[in-house]
Amino acid sequence: MADPPPPTDPDRLSSLRRRVDAARGQSGRTTGAETQNASSMALRFGGEFGAAILVGALLGYGIDYFLHTGGVALAIGLGLGFITGVVNVVRLARAYSKAHPTDPAAKPPRDDDDE
């Protein structure tokens, strides 16, 4: 026999919702593109690039293994993986720069040699 559904009390639900919203506001944490700092973007770029090369190499090796082509497909797979990795990194960089535009009137950062 199934358990009866718990009673829903609108006041309890609204109170819980207010407490959860208040706790989220106090934590100060946000989600989304605002929290992406330079190190996380660098790791993402590197991961995309490395994964594309790895997939290309594995596909090329697999084709070489089954067709006994002596490394030709591996070389082609590495080349295609490299090209795909570059395309992915450029695509990510464009998306990042579109989401985080720079102010054209802003001064460039000071160089360490400028004193």
Image (cartoon, rainbow, N blue to C red):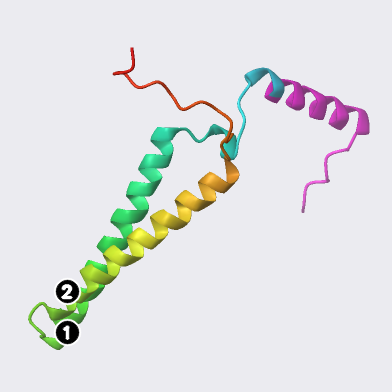
Q: Pick whichever, 40 or 25, lies toward us.
A: 40
Residue 71 in percent (x, y) is at 10, 77
- Which one is in front in this view, the residue at disc 2 or the one at disc 1? 2
Looking at numbered disc 2 in the image, what kind of residue is underneath it? Answer: Leu
Q: Which residue is mark 2?
A: 74
Q: Quadrant of residue 51?
A: bottom left
Looking at numbered disc 1 in the image, what kind of residue is underneath it? Answer: Phe
| Main secondary-structure element of the magenta-colored stretch | helix
Q: Which residue is mark 1?
A: 66
Q: Which residues are magenta?
A: 1-24
Q: Residues within 10 Å of mark 1 (few under 14, many from 20)?
A: few
Residue 114 in percent (x, y) is at 33, 17
Residue 39 in percent (x, y) is at 39, 34
Q: Which mark is residue 88?
A: none
Q: Specify whether 106 is left or right of 20.
A: left
- The answer to if 3 sits in the magenta stretch is yes
Q: Pick whichever, 2 or 37, lies toward us.
A: 37
Residue at point 36%, 42% (across, down)? 43
Residue at point 40%, 46% (across, down)? 44
Is residue 49 something one can see in this rendering?
yes
Measure the C-alpha gap from mark 2 to mark 1: 12 Å
> For the residue labelled by badge 2, is the local secondary structure a helix, a strand or a loop?
helix
> For the residue labelled by badge 1, is the local secondary structure a helix, a strand or a loop?
helix
- The answer to if 26 sits in the magenta stretch is no
Q: Pick whichever, 29 or 105, lies toward us.
A: 105
